[in-house]
């Protein structure tokens, strides 16, 4: 009996050992804007059950680690196998091309133009990333303050100037602290800047701040005359990100330009404190009423020891039913064209949040081609940082707008010279 | 206890004697120094050498093998100025803004720090009530993490912070302190002094207590006034300690980063951006990562710190020699 027990134990240990040795471990570096990593953990648990040879370990990290630590880890060859990233084109040199392992036709049909955001440009047609959450910038408006002030909201096709005038009027009438605010981010001002004529590219397709000055002048003037919440851009240094969501939630802000990823937060924190709505992006003197697309995607890295397993994990997440479930549970806009076409019933979203997400989705066709190209530009992060630094210096009076623009061009030239 | 130690010592004695016979008594010293030398070499000396290679190479690659040699280009970029007094005339204007901000910050912070620390130490050295309690109170901020210090003061000074609530209550009216460049800089100096003063007060207090009592008794018998006693006895006898405090505060001042970065992020604009923040942002926070420029700037800071450290060593040696 004793002998039998020992033999059984030994065999079980051997089988378990062999199983462990053959299991391919895939490490997934994940950050959450809301509950994304939690949902991935749940969904990938099912994937593991269906694929016993693959063990997916999700390492949840702060967003800052994705921005600052991940590139260094990748350069040193010690990165994860998979990560959720926002510097889509900037990390291209490290991406694993999924094309040999997945159904190209399905991916191209499902993810369309967003696949370009992960490519190196030129004739690169690799499949590198699944755009997991599509975002678009746009404005949140405190409808209750408008109602209290008896001011009518500017209608469709209204310009930034129209909204600035209306917001000032509302803030004055209701004693709200700030008429308007835009997040302190180069990405956030890109849409408005394009509406004012920013081209972001020169004739050869290289990054440029050509045409940015009219928006810079308007924005600096709004910060000086109190139309914009000066705290957001002037109370920080460097290229540090700063949002104004809390001011909006507190009912201190009439018009808040941010993006679709804030819907969940607004839904949870504003509650029935006041009525809010999303109005998309105002138009500018140059014509477009463009927001800026963006978001995050799941990519695999070339340095992985298990490329097939990595591709299998990402391909699983890209399947329409899985993608639709994750989108509904995380309350993000879908980049998967099939899921978008079928429509998403967002889980636990209030009618206001559902309307807001629909309003953001409805503003997608207004996005300028320049904004799409800028989002996919490999050096856009450098340009975002330069925009924030130099525009802030103009706002606080360290530089004139013209000097700031000149410096921005010089910074970009220097950055391009150093970049690979 | 001794019964345990003695056999252990005998156990070590055998290989040590063998080693001593092999190397000779003079070389044995190096064996004892080896662990420290290895650690110092790996974590202090090697990074300095690597930093030099980064400073003389370009591109945003991390691996040295992938970085082309560019000679002194990064240093030239940093030093390219029409007038060093006006950062706007410099090619790398952010570096020179950081240099000037750091210079002003160090001058003001060190001046106030040494002055207030001395005053506090003198008061705490007197026979006042609850002296132990007050000594703890002044030392308490030193125990706080720099980020905690920054967050506490940010909550106090932000637009809807405690300070403005108080000013509104008194009818004076609040002010947006952190959006005004001059106020943000002034508060940065104040917070830095507040956070570190306790440490220097403690050193000066020790210095004050080391002054022999009989010197003061002699001054009292000679009817010297308190001011004269302070000027002719306290200050001269405390000056070696003060010099140490001054040099230490200077070194710490140049290295200022974490609490001000968490407090203002270097803003508004670049009003509170100091040299270490510049290095951090160029090398790690920005895109692309300009390691070469950051390494060149950090070598320049290292030279300044080296000079200050040599002064400190010289002062210490002079004090030790009496």
Image (cartoon, coloured by chain):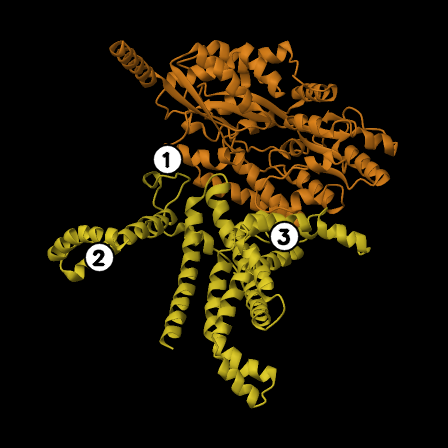
Residues flagged by tags 2 and 3 on a common chain = no
Residue at image location 70% in from the left, 45% down from the top: A230
Q: Mark on residue B30?
A: 2
Q: Which of the pair B87/B283 is nearer the observer?
A: B283
Q: Which chain does the yellow colour mark?
A: B
User: Which of the chains bears the disc numbered 2?
Assistant: B
Distance of label 1 from label 2 (alpha carbons): 35 Å
Residue placed under numbered mark 1 in the picture:
A76
Q: Nearer the viewer, mark 3 or mark 1?
A: 1
Helix, strand or loop at label 2? It is helix
Between residue A113 and residue A103, name the one nearer to us: A103
Image chain in orange: A
Labelled disc at residue A398: 3
The answer to whether residue A241 is left or right of residue A108 is: right
Whether label 1 touches label 2, CB < 8 Å: no
Q: Residues within 10 Å of mark 1 (few under 14, many from 20)?
A: few
User: Which residue reaches farthest bottom?
Assistant: B222
Number of callouts = 3
Q: Residue furthest left?
A: B21
Question: Which x, y percent locates residue B285?
Answer: 50, 41
Cα separation, mark 3 vs mark 1, equals 38 Å
* Residue A318 appears in the rendering: yes
Could you tell me which secondary element the residue under label 3 belongs to?
A: loop
Work out whether A364 lies above or below B294.
above
Judged by depth in the image, the label closer to the viewer, 1 or 2, is 2
Residue drawn at (55%, 10%) of the image: A321
Label 1 sits on a secondary structure element that is helix
Label 3 marks a residue whose chain is A
Give coordinates of residue A344: x percent, y percent.
Answer: 64, 13
CA–CA distance in space, label 2 to label 3: 56 Å
């Amino acid at each position: 009996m004793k002998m039998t027990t020992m033999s059984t134990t030994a065999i079980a240990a051997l089988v378990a050992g062999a199983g462990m040795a053959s299991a391919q471990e895939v490490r997934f570096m994940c950050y959450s804007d809301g509950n994304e990593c939690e949902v991935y953990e749940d969904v990938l648990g099912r994937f593991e059950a269906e694929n016993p040879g693959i063990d997916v370990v999700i390492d949840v990290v702060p967003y800052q680690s994705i921005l600052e630590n991940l590139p260094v880890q990748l350069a040193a060859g010690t990165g994860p196998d998979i990560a959720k990233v926002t510097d889509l084109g900037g990390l291209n040199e490290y991406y694993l091309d999924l094309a040999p392992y997945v159904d190209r036709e399905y991916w191209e049909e499902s993810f369309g133009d967003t696949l370009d955001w992960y490519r190196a440009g030129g004739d690169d047609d690799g499949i590198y990333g699944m755009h997991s959450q599509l975002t678009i910038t746009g404005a949140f408006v405190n409808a209750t303050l408008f109602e209290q002030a008896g001011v009518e909201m500017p209608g469709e096709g209204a310009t930034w100037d129209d909204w600035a005038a209306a917001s000032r009027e509302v803030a004055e009438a209701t004693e709200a602290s700030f008429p308007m605010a835009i997040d302190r981010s180069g990405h956030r001002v890109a849409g408005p800047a394009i509406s004012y004529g920013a081209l972001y590219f020169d004739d050869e397709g290289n990054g440029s701040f050509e045409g940015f000055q009219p928006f810079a002048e308007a924005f600096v003037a709004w910060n000086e005359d109190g139309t914009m919440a000066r705290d957001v851009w002037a109370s920080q240094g460097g290229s540090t990100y700063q949002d104004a969501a809390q001011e909006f939630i507190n009912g201190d802000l009439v018009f808040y330009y941010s993006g679709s990823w804030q819907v969940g937060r607004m839904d949870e924190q504003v509650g029935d404190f006041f009525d809010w709505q999303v109005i998309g992006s105002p138009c500018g003197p140059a014509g477009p009423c463009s927001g800026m697309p963006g978001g995050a995607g799941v990519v695999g890295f070339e340095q992985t020891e298990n490329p097939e397993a990595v591709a299998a994990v990402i391909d699983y997440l890209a399947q329409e039913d899985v993608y639709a479930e994750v989108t509904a549970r995380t309350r993000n806009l879908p980049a998967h064209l099939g899921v978008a076409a079928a429509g998403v019933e967002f889980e636990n979203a209030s009618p206001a949040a559902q309307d807001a997400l629909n309003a953001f989705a409805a503003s997608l066709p207004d996005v300028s081609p320049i904004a799409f190209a800028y989002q996919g530009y490999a050096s856009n992060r450098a340009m975002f940082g330069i925009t924030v630094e130099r525009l802030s210096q103009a706002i606080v009076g360290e530089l004139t707008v013209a000097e700031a623009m000149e410096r921005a061009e010089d910074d970009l030239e220097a950055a391009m010279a150093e970049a690979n | 206890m001794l019964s345990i130690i003695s056999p252990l010592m005998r156990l070590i004695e055998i290989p040590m004697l063998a080693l001593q016979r092999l190397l000779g008594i003079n070389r044995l010293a190096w064996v004892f120094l080896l662990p420290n030398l290895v650690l110092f070499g790996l974590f202090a000396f090697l990074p300095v050498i690597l930093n030099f290679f980064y400073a003389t190479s370009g591109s945003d690659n991390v691996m040295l093998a992938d970085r082309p040699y560019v000679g002194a280009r990064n240093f030239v970029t940093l030093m390219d100025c029409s007038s060093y007094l006006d950062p706007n005339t410099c090619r790398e204007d952010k570096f020179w803004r950081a240099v000037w901000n750091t210079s002003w910050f160090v001058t003001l912070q060190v001046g106030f720090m040494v002055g207030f620390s001395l005053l506090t130490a003198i008061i705490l050295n007197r026979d006042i009530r609850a002296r132990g309690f007050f000594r703890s109170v002044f030392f308490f901020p030193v125990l706080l993490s720099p980020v905690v210090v920054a967050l506490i003061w940010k909550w106090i000074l932000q637009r809807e912070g405690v300070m403005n609530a108080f000013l509104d209550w008194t009818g004076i009216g609040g002010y947006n302190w952190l959006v005004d460049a001059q106020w943000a800089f002034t508060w940065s100096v104040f917070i830095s002094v507040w956070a570190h003063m306790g440490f220097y007060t403690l050193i000066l207090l020790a210095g004050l207590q080391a002054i022999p009592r009989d010197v003061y008794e002699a001054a009292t018998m000679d009817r010297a006034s308190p001011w004269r006693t302070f000027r002719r006895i306290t200050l001269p006898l405390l000056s070696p300690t003060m010099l140490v405090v001054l040099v230490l505060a200077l070194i710490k001042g140049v290295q200022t980063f974490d609490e001000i970065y968490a407090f203002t992020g270097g803003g508004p604009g670049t009003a509170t951006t100091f040299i270490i923040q510049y290095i951090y942002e160029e090398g790690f926070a920005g895109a692309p990562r300009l390691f070469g420029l950051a390494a060149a700037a950090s070598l320049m800071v290292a030279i300044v710190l080296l000079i200050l450290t040599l002064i400190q060593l010289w002062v210490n040696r002079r004090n030790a020699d009496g």
